[in-house]
Amino acid sequence: MDTFVAFLRGINVGGHGRLPMKDLVAAIERVGGHDVKTYIQSGNAVFESSKKDHTKLSEQLASEIEKGHGFRPHVLILELAAIANAIENNPFPEAEAEPKHLHLGFLSSVPKAPNLDKLGTIKKHNERFKLIGAVFYLHAPDGVGRSKLAASSEKLLGAPMTDRNWSTVCKMRELASG
């Protein structure tokens, strides 16, 4: 069995996309997941599965949630190794001291033509970013809620993305590692 991390975007935020974690666990189990653990209420889970195709698992989980809850969230399922690599490749290690200001945007694929120049023109003077493969690292000391860079990154990168702060990413690796 392989260990996977599931990130769902836009659930249980502002009263929209309501999905109790017990229902998420049940949906993951219905698509072949075992030993499911969730973290906070915003769509983070780790599980084991004998299925190897995480892209297909993402689609199956999104469909399962749509059947049971009437909405289809963006679901990104990654192998544990991808999470570990993202943590190891952090280009802003000094930002780890303020984990709510360091975000990792996990993209559904490596962007083919990301507009990094435009991202550079809209960032604040104290913001930093780096794209490494299918991970967009963003250090936003004033918070992502006020960041034009954060708001525009998915569109300018050209691939669906779900974002997690450093604390959440590290916690997911911890949960997945046992």
Image (spheres, grey):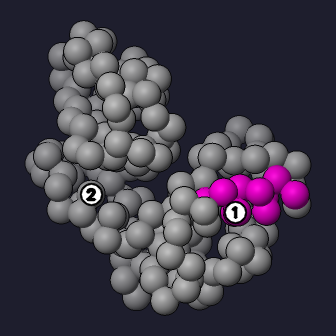
Q: Is residue 154 above or below residue 68?
A: above
Of callouts 1 and 2, the N-terminal one: 1
Q: What percent of the width, then of the height, locates residue 52?
A: 50, 76
Identify the image quadrant of the C terminus.
bottom left
Q: What percent of the width, then of the height, locates residue 84?
A: 28, 68
Q: What percent of the width, then of the height, locates residue 48?
A: 53, 83
Residue at the disc numbered 2 = 86
Residue 25 in sight here: no
Residue at the disc numbered 1 = 61
For marks 1 and 2, give the one nearer the viewer.
1
- Residue 85 in magenta stretch: no
Left or right of residue 29, residue 94 in this image: left
Secondary structure under the numbered disc 1 in the rendered image:
helix
Q: Is residue 21 above or below residue 101?
A: below
Q: Tag on residue 104?
A: none
Quarter of the rendering containing residue 152: top left
Quarter of the rendering containing residue 168: bottom left
Q: What percent of the width, then of the height, locates residue 96?
A: 21, 53
Left or right of residue 115, residue 65 in this image: right
Magenta: main secondary structure: helix
Q: Which one is in front, 3 or 125?
A: 3
Residue 26 in sight here: yes
> What residue span does the magenta drawing correspond to?
58-67
Picture residue at 18% right of the left edge, 62% below the top: 88
Picture residue at 31% right of the left edge, 19% below the top: 115
Which amino acid type is shown beneath numbered disc 2? Ala
Which amino acid type is shown beneath numbered disc 1? Leu
Q: Is residue 53 above or below residue 10?
A: below
